[in-house]
Image (spheres, rainbow, N blue to C red):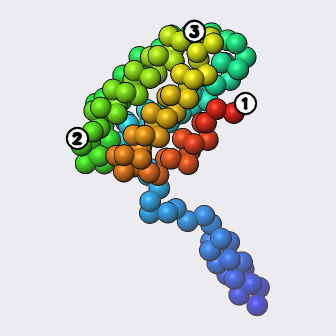
Amino acid sequence: MRILLSLSFILLISSCQEKKSKYVLDEKSEMAQLMLYMHASLDEVQLKIKNGENLGDYPEEFDKVIDAEMTDESMRSGSWESFANALIESEKALYNAAPEEQEQAYKNVVNSCLACHTSVGCSGPIPKIKKLSWKP
């Protein structure tokens, strides 16, 4: 009886272990890593703007968005380069904006991200990007 209870307990524990989804990427592409870095950076930038802090220098890593390896290279189609360049320009404008213009420049960056993900057909990150919206 004790053995049966022990086996039942082991089966119960093993069946409760978290199962990995087949859609979870164990390794992120260079682009996915860059996008996560950009997202974290925007979170910090919003706080800096609200606190009247200096944003620092434009992170040159953002320029890699043009040619970073993508999870799905088929996304790098016709309009991709235009959107990537628009993102870089909006990021540079944010880091160069006068303090009174930074809030709008920040909004422009977030809108640039949303426009690209909507147009290129990579809608998965959109909810996360929307969380970057300016919070008064």
Mark 2 neighbour density, 10 Å: few (under 14) some (14–19) many (20 or more):
few
- Residue marked by disc 2: 78
Residue 136 shows which numbered tag?
1
Identify the amino acid type marked 2.
Gly
Q: Which of marks 2 and 1 is nearer the N terminus?
A: 2
23 or 44, nearer to the observer: 44
Q: Is 103 positioned to the left or the right of 86 in the image? A: right
User: How far from the left and from the top, in percent, is residue 31?
Assistant: 38, 37
Q: Is residue 68 above or below residue 14?
A: above
Q: Distance between the residues labelled 3 and 2?
A: 34 Å
Q: In this view, does 102 lie above or below 72?
A: above
- Residues at badges 3 and 2 in contact (C-beta under 8 Å)? no
Q: Residue at x 27, y 39 (%)?
A: 79
User: How far from the left and from the top, in percent, is residue 4?
Assistant: 71, 87
85 or 42, nearer to the observer: 85
Q: Is 59 positioned to the left or the right of 107 in the image? A: left
Residue 98 shows which numbered tag?
3
